[in-house]
């Protein structure tokens, strides 16, 4: 059969992801800090854009109309025909509110410029402050370099001796010097050695405290004080006094040099209770307000400006308009998604976490006629301030646990019940996981023992044998 070249006409629909649309989708999933950084970067690279305080104008609405009327008709038509924004994203018919800016107490300049000393630097400073030989300095530097963030030495003295070429005796001698550094207990090779270093620093050698640490750490962990009392032939009262001293020791001496800095969350949206209703307000505070630079608008009307210059300005102007529209669209979408979530979780807003309902992305997507991926982007790294506290929007999406009455209960609600049960238990006889299962049935919550164990571990709650306090 002979091959022939033919032309045919086919009608099909496809979505063209223009650079502008890709930008809009990318902005949608940015966190608040990332958005501010993106806007500031665009202001630096696009001369048409400038930051503006809308409180200086008579209108608080974003003044897209102010510059669109000066935008050349031809360029405006080209921009409009690039992509039908409203046909792709259906969020345009929802109103949104601006949260007025207000003066707030900001952290001091020192809070941004100060640098916290880490454990390694602190130990090296002490090493240099000691009158040591060159060999001792080399061994000391190697030892400190192998101390982890908790303050423990992670290699043996034999390995240090082999790697440095110095004898084990010299390594041991240098290790004893470092173990006298601050924080007390640093350089230990295990928990027992760490605690023993600390009690010797407190002159508690040859006491009941040292005996318990040396031989009964496992019994101490499970709170089997009766066995310790019997084997050491001492009273329970003496054991408890020793336990009180041990509990005040630091099992991770490097902890204070490695604590994570507190990160303050600025909510993207606020939910306020006004009477019997709830109001949703977008937080615009701190976000740069954008407008078109009047100088470049005037250049477009100037007949003496070369066409190449006007073409460059028009290109930058289109980019600026898309950025502003993308930001406004992001605000509208966040508002609508939050409004839908709060509609599902109204009982949570009124009564607390126990009344959090099971919710999945599909529920909100169907409510707003959006795609689930859009909901996922909106709820990523976005925070909402509610009467019950500040939460990430993803917090409100959780799995369901079927109750005894057939109704679904959210997993977060079950965790809150478990937390309250353990909080109110008798510390001398804490509830086992199976006993918690039986108590949950009183709240019409039917879960397996392994589910209780999983939720308890997720909340960093110890098992009953480790929560037990006989006194």
Image: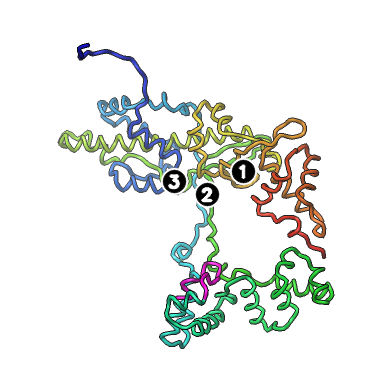
- The numbered mark at residue 386 is 1
Q: Secondary structure at mark 2?
A: loop
Sequence-earlier tag: 3 or 2:
2
Residue 463 higher or lower than 392, as above or below: below
For residue 313, what is the image quadrant?
Answer: top left
Q: Nearer the viewer, residue 428 or 434?
A: 434
Who's the residue at 70% across and 72% down the image?
Answer: 246
* Residue 304 placement, left or right of 332: left
Query: Against 31, is 122 above or below?
Result: below
The overriding secondary structure of the stretch rendered in magenta is loop
Front-lying residue, 405 or 438: 438
Magenta range is 142-156
Indicate the position of residue 292 as horizontal and vertical percent values.
32, 39
Colour approach in the figure = rainbow
Q: Residue 389: percent from the left, percent from the top?
A: 63, 47
Circle 3 residue:
287
Q: Which residue is mark 2?
A: 266
| SS class, disc 1 | strand
**Residue 12 visible within the image:** yes
Q: Which badge, 1 or 2, is on the more N-terminal residue?
A: 2
**In the rendering, which numbered label is found on residue 251?**
none
């Amino acid at each position: 059969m002979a091959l022939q070249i033919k032309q045919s006409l086919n009608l099909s629909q496809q979505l063209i992801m223009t650079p502008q649309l890709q930008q809009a989708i990318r902005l949608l999933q940015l966190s608040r800090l990332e958005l501010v950084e993106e806007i500031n970067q665009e202001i630096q690279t696009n001369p048409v854009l400038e930051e503006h305080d809308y409180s200086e104008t008579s209108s608080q609405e974003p003044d897209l109309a102010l510059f669109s009327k000066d935008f050349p008709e031809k360029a405006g038509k080209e921009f409009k025909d690039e992509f039908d924004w409203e046909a792709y994203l259906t969020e345009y018919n929802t109103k949104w509110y601006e949260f007025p800016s207000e003066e707030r107490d900001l952290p001091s300049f020192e809070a941004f410029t100060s640098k916290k000393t880490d454990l390694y630097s602190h130990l090296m400073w002490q090493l240099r402050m000691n009158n040591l030989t060159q060999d001792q300095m080399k061994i000391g530097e190697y030892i400190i370099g192998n101390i982890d963030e908790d303050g423990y030495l992670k290699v043996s003295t034999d390995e240090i001796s082999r790697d440095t070429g110095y004898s084990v005796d010299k390594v041991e001698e240098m290790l004893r010097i470092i173990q006298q550094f601050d924080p007390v207990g640093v350089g230990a090779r295990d928990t027992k050695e760490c605690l023993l270093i600390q009690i010797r620093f407190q002159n508690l050698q040859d006491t009941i405290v040292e005996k318990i640490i040396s031989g009964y750490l496992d019994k101490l962990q499970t709170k089997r004080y009766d066995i310790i009392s019997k084997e050491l032939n001492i009273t329970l009262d003496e054991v408890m006094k020793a336990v009180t001293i041990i509990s005040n020791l630091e099992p991770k001496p490097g902890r204070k040099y490695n604590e994570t800095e507190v990160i303050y969350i600025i909510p993207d949206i606020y939910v306020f209770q006004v009477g019997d209703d709830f109001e949703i307000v977008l937080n615009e505070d701190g976000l740069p307000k954008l407008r078109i630079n009047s100088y470049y608008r005037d250049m477009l009307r100037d007949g003496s400006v070369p066409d190449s210059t006007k073409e460059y300005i028009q290109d930058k102007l289109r980019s600026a308009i898309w950025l502003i529209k993308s930001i406004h669209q992001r605000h509208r979408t966040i508002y609508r998604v939050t409004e839908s979530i709060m509609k599902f979780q109204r009982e949570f807003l009124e009564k607390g976490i126990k009344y959090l309902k099971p919710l999945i992305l599909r529920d909100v997507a169907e409510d707003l006629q959006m795609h689930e991926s859009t909901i996922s982007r909106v709820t990523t790294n976005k925070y909402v301030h509610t009467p019950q506290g500040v939460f990430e929007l993803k917090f409100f999406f959780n799995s369901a646990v079927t109750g005894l009455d057939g109704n679904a209960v959210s997993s977060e609600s079950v965790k809150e019940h478990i937390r309250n049960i353990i909080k109110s238990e008798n510390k001398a006889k804490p509830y086992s996981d199976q006993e918690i299962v039986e108590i949950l049935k009183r709240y019409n919550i039917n879960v397996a023992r392994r589910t209780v164990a999983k939720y308890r571990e997720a909340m960093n709650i110890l098992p009953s044998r480790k929560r037990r306090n006989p006194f």
